[in-house]
Image (tube, rainbow, N blue to C red):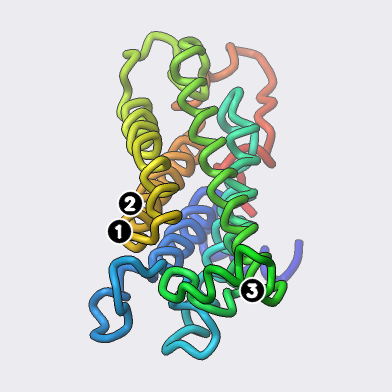
Amino acid sequence: MGVVEAVLRIAGFTRRSLAWLCGIAGLLAYNWWVLAPFKYGLMRSPNELFSNLEVTGQPYAIVMQRADVTAGILLLFAFILAGSRTVIEGRREWLGMVVFAMAGAIGGLFPQVCADGLSPACMSAEWHFRLAASQYVHDGSGVIEFAGITLALLLAVMRIRGNGASPGGRPPGSPRSTPTARGYRVIGWVVLVAYPVLGVGYLFNFYGAVIEAVFFSAFTAMVLLQLSERLARRNELSPDPGPGMMNRWDPIASPDAPL
């Protein structure tokens, strides 16, 4: 056992508690955008994308970039600690959430070089591939970030609809409409409506900040639902083994396992 593991064990940390700590801290960093409208003069237009605030040279740009990197790393650790097998038939969702976290960190490492949400010249140069590579890495990572978590949401909705007996989704005998299931469905409808609006808003450059805020809020709820489902206690996930049977609960997959 390493020194760090020994200290964490003495402090009483388990995979569950440390995963929640990383997850909540990561979401606080992820939602730095909530503070931006309250800083006078920081956002010049509701058409401005929040990522435009991270353009090098903008006030607080470095802080925002580091917040994105921190959020991505902490959320990645949270899902690694939560485990990919703690929700039956939910491994692909876990992969989507991992991609989401990693892409978010990459986006923070490679900020935009100009504000495409405000400058027509920047937008034109971007469409004609005349900007530095950092702009396109940032944009590409953003697309992958959205795709990863959206795919995870789609798979979660399909799981709760199609697998009524799944211990990781709806335990046997539980009502069809659990709070978790309702949460996934609500987020699904929000995203379904918001994606076309996002596309139109980006093409015609209007209310980008408002549309992004809707997505960021929905994605925050998605992270919380995934973590809460994966970090549920063992007897909420699956029935205990029968009397006399050896407990084969995988310590890597179990959030109860001490570090």
User: Looking at the image, is mark 2 or mark 1 nearer the viewer?
Assistant: 1
Quarter of the image for residue 228 reads top left
From the viewer's perspective, tell me whether residue 142 is left or right of residue 25: right
The residue that mark 2 highlights is 214
For marks 3 and 1 on the same chain, the one whose residue lies earlier in the sequence = 3
Where residue 17 appears, x then y in whole percent? Answer: 48, 54
Disc 2 element: helix
Report the amino acid beneath label 2.
Val
The mark found on residue 210 in the picture is: 1
The type of residue carrying mark 1 is Val
User: How far apart are labels 2 and 3 at the CA level?
Assistant: 24 Å
Task: Name the residue at 37% across, 69% down.
Answer: 48
Q: Are the two marked residues, 2 and 1, in contact with CB atoms closer than 8 angstroms?
A: yes
Q: Which residue is mark 3?
A: 109
Few, some or many residues within 10 Å of mark 1 (<14, 14–19, 20+): some
Q: x, y (%) of residue 150? A: 51, 39
Q: Quadrant of the N terminus?
A: bottom right
Residue type beneath disc 3: Leu
Label 2 environment density (alpha carbons within 10 Å; few <14, some 14–19, many ≥20): some
> Residue visible at 56% across and 42% down?
255
Kindly identify the residue that appears in the image at 34 percent across and 63 percent down.
209
Q: Tell me which corner region of the image, top left, top right, bottom left or bottom right, holds residue 91.
A: top right
Relative image position of residue 141 (x, y in whole percent): 63, 58
Q: Nearer the viewer, residue 84 or 124?
A: 124
